[in-house]
Image (cartoon, rainbow, N blue to C red):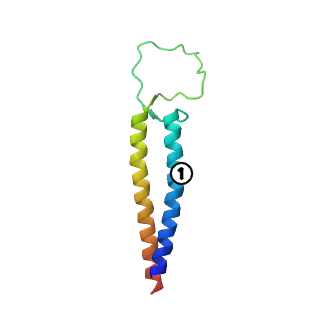
Amino acid sequence: MAAVAQTYAQTLRKTNDVAKIKETRLRADIASGEHKLFVSIKAPDCPIQAAADATITSGNTETRAELNRGIAEALINITSRGDQAIRQLNVCVDQYETMRNAK
C-alpha cells in the first residue's frame, strides 16, 4: 500500500513540475507582452451603418477587449490553483481505484 502511495506521489510531483514550467512560461509571455489575453465583448450599437458592399479586411469580426496584465495574472492564478486541485483529485481517485481493485 505504501508503494502505491509513493508511486502516485511521484507521478503527481512530475505532473505538477511540468505544469509549473508551462505556467511560468505563460506568466513570462504575458509580462513581456508576447502573449495577450482577450475577452469577447458586446459591441456598442453604432448609429452609422456600413455600406452593403463593404468588405471586411480581416477574417476576425469578433469584438474583443484586451485584458490588462494584472487581470491576466489573476486569471492565471485562479486557473493554476484549479488545475492543481484537479490533478490532486485525479491522483486520489486513481489511488483509490488501485487499492479497491487490489483486494
- Classed neighbour count for the residue bearing mark 1: other residues with Cα under 10 Å, few (<14), some (14–19), many (≥20): few
Residue 25, given in percent of the width and then of the height, sits at: 54, 45
* SS state under label 1: helix
**As drawn, is 46 to the left or to the right of 24?**
left
Q: Where does the C terminus fall, quadrant-wise?
A: bottom left
Above or below for 61 versus 95: above
Where's residue 4, x and y in %? 48, 78
Q: Amino acid at mark 1?
A: Ile
Residue 33, placed above or below residue 52: below
Q: Who's the residue at 40% across and 53% down the image?
A: 82
Q: Position of residue 43 (x, y in %)?
A: 42, 25
Which residue is located at x 45 percent, y 68 percent? 91
Q: Residue at x 53, y 49 (%)?
A: 22
Depth order, front residue of 66/70: 70
Which residue is nearer to you in this view: 53 or 102?
Answer: 102
Residue at the (40%, 28%) spot, across then down: 42
From this view, report whether residue 75 is shown above or below residue 83: above
Q: Position of residue 34 (x, y in %)?
A: 55, 34
Judge whether 69 appears above or below 83 on screen: above
The total of numbered circles placed on residues is 1
For mark 1, what is the residue?
21
Q: Is residue 36 visible?
A: no
Do we see residue 78 in this rendering? yes
